[in-house]
Amino acid sequence: MLWGEGWARSINSGGGNRSRHASQCCSRAGPHRGTVGLATNPGQPRQFVLVSQRSLWEIIDMLTRLYAENFKCLASVGLDFAPLTVLVGPNGSGKSSVLEALRKVSDLLTQRNNTEALFPTDSLTRWDTRSEQLFQLEVRLPGEGDGSGSLPGGLYRYTLRLSHDKLRAKNRIAEEKLNFEGKTLYRGWLDDSEAGEASAPTFRAHLFRDNGTEGAEVLGDWHYSGIARIGPRPENRLLQRFRRYIEHLVILSINPGSVTAEARREQSLVNFDGSDFAAWFLCSSIQPALDTAYLP
């Protein structure tokens, strides 16, 4: 869990005082649950990532590390997350930028948008002269299933490297890679070995099987995540599990003034500003009970 300054005391106090930004919330996070994040300053919209149905001390699967380079005020920052992590700092210290980096990377991995919309040129660190951005996520997930169809637990490491053209305000993926316990599951890269003065480089995507052997190599689109576009197959279940985990991340920047007071229906997705939080929370609260009722 990742909590921001201003919410820490409400955990121990029971959340009864609004001045402490008290809140109690849970979410339906599917088969993988593990990270809660929040960054807030008094008088500003609260921002948080909410991905936990389990209680604080029962988390097994979780986001364990974020690294961001040349993104807003994060010139070169790595954060290791414990089951409970509190971000504390003054305005402009990077609390919100950490959560925004998580949101943008997860949006790319779930095809909610492309690199040019998510990482415009003005997202580069103002005082950094480099034209590349780098993001890395580490996620630890437990084993699943029994017998021959089981999936082992272990550590995923995701890397995204973006190349920017500052003059034209354009960007593209220079490299995207996903590893599991040291084995490559996917690699996409910008191949300029055959590019000439009149031709552009090619983006290549190389797929790998769960056992580490090489699969197909295809041409990709340098503005979109290749991982998000790979269809499920028996030989890439490890990659699909990582993608499911990312798909169940819920990232919000709540503006309390825009949140509706009632929910007329359940809603599985929530707006970024939290305006329909009640409808989403109702759906999140009801769905686990329905799932439990139909367990074999």
Image (spheres, helix red, strand yellow):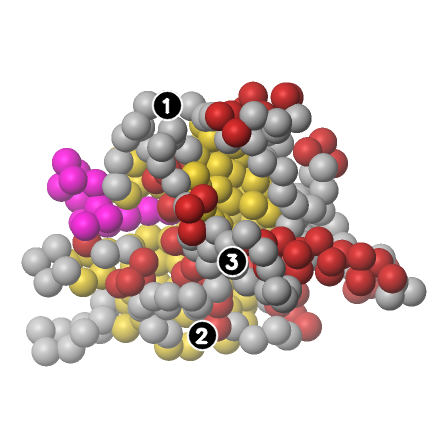
Whether residue 66 is visible to the viewer of this picture, yes or no, is no
Provide the secondary structure element on which disc 3 rests.
Answer: loop
Give the camera-side residue of 263 and 5. Answer: 263
Provide the secondary structure element on which disc 2 rests.
Answer: strand
Per the model, the C-alpha gap separating discs 3 and 2 is: 42 Å
Residue assigned mark 2 = 217
Q: Is residue 150 above or below residue 111?
A: above
Mark 3 / mark 2, whichever is N-terminal: 2
Quadrant where the image shows the N terminus: top right
Provide the secondary structure element on which disc 1 rests.
Answer: loop
Residue assigned mark 1 = 89
Give the camera-side residue of 107 and 166. Answer: 107
Per the model, the C-alpha gap separating discs 3 and 1 is: 29 Å
Residue 133 image offset from top left, x and y in percent: 28, 48
Mark 2 / mark 1, whichever is N-terminal: 1
* Magenta residue span: 122-138
Whether residue 286 is visible to the viewer of this picture, yes or no, is yes
Mark nearer the viewer, 2 or 1: 1
**Amino acid under disc 2:** Glu
Mark nearer the viewer, 3 or 1: 3
Check if mark 3's residue and mark 2's residue have beta carbons within 8 Å.
Answer: no
Mark nearer the viewer, 3 or 2: 3
**Amino acid under disc 1:** Gly
State yes or no: residue 123 in magenta: yes
Residue assigned mark 3 = 276
Residue 77 image offset from top left, x and y in percent: 35, 33
Graded by Cα atoms within 10 Å as few (under 14), some (14 to 19) or many (20 or more), the crowding at tag 2 reads: few
Q: Specify the label residue 274 is tagged with.
A: none
